[in-house]
């Protein structure tokens, strides 16, 4: 209806209280409730979603198609399609995104860097426009 791609399922969870030290690659979807020290990246060949919950902390870079942050990230963020920053999001690092949704209360300590993708963006039409 609105030409939205279906989100991949979240198949993996790093539970609250868990700690991972090292780089992590994932397919489809990943939710982090615990702590990760290392880079987190989705495999490029598939659509991906990464959720960093309110209780999560990541020290390292993150890269995925759709990223939702409500916890703490210390490192660069690369969202190929969409970045959602929930009210308790705390990011220390540069943020690269194609589309950004930022809720009141989210904090970014770094540069906002929009990426210019070749993918065509939808055009918006004003309701009051008579043409």
Image (cartoon, rainbow, N blue to C red):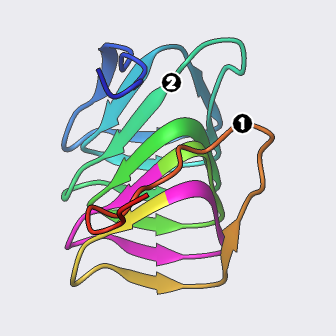
**Quadrant where the N terminus is found in the figure:** top left
- Residue 109: image location, x then y, percent: 53, 87
Residue 4, image quadrant = top left
Q: Residues within 10 Å of mark 2 (few under 14, many from 20)?
A: many
2 or 96: nearer the viewer = 2
Q: Which residues are magenta?
A: 83-99
Q: Is residue 90 magenta?
A: yes
Asked if the magenta segment contains residue 61, the reply would be: no
Q: Quadrant of the C terminus?
A: bottom left
* Element type at mark 2: loop
Determine which of the numbered discs, if any, sits on residue 88 in the image.
none
Left or right side of 113 for 11 = left
- Indicate the position of residue 56 as horizontal and vertical percent values: 29, 54
Of the numbered discs in the image, which one, if any, rests on residue 119?
1
Q: How far apart are the alpha carbons under marks 1 and 2?
A: 17 Å
The majority secondary structure of the magenta stretch comes to: strand
Q: Which mark is residue 48?
A: 2
What residue is shown at x 31% (from left), y 33% (from top)?
Answer: 31
The residue shown at (31%, 13%) is 9
Q: Tell me how many marks there are.
A: 2
């Amino acid at each position: 209806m609105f030409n939205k791609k279906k989100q991949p399922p979240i198949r993996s969870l790093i539970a609250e209280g868990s700690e991972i030290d090292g780089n992590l690659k994932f397919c489809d979807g990943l939710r982090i409730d615990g702590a990760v020290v290392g880079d987190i990246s989705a495999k490029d060949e598939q659509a991906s979603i990464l959720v960093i919950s309110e209780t999560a902390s990541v020290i390292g870079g993150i890269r995925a198609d759709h990223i939702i942050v409500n916890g703490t990230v210390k490192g660069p963020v690369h969202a190929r399609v969409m970045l959602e920053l929930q009210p308790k999001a705390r990011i220390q690092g540069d943020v690269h995104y194609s589309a950004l949704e930022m809720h009141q209360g989210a904090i970014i300590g770094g540069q906002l860097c929009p990426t210019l993708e070749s993918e065509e963006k939808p055009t918006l039409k004003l309701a009051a426009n008579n043409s």
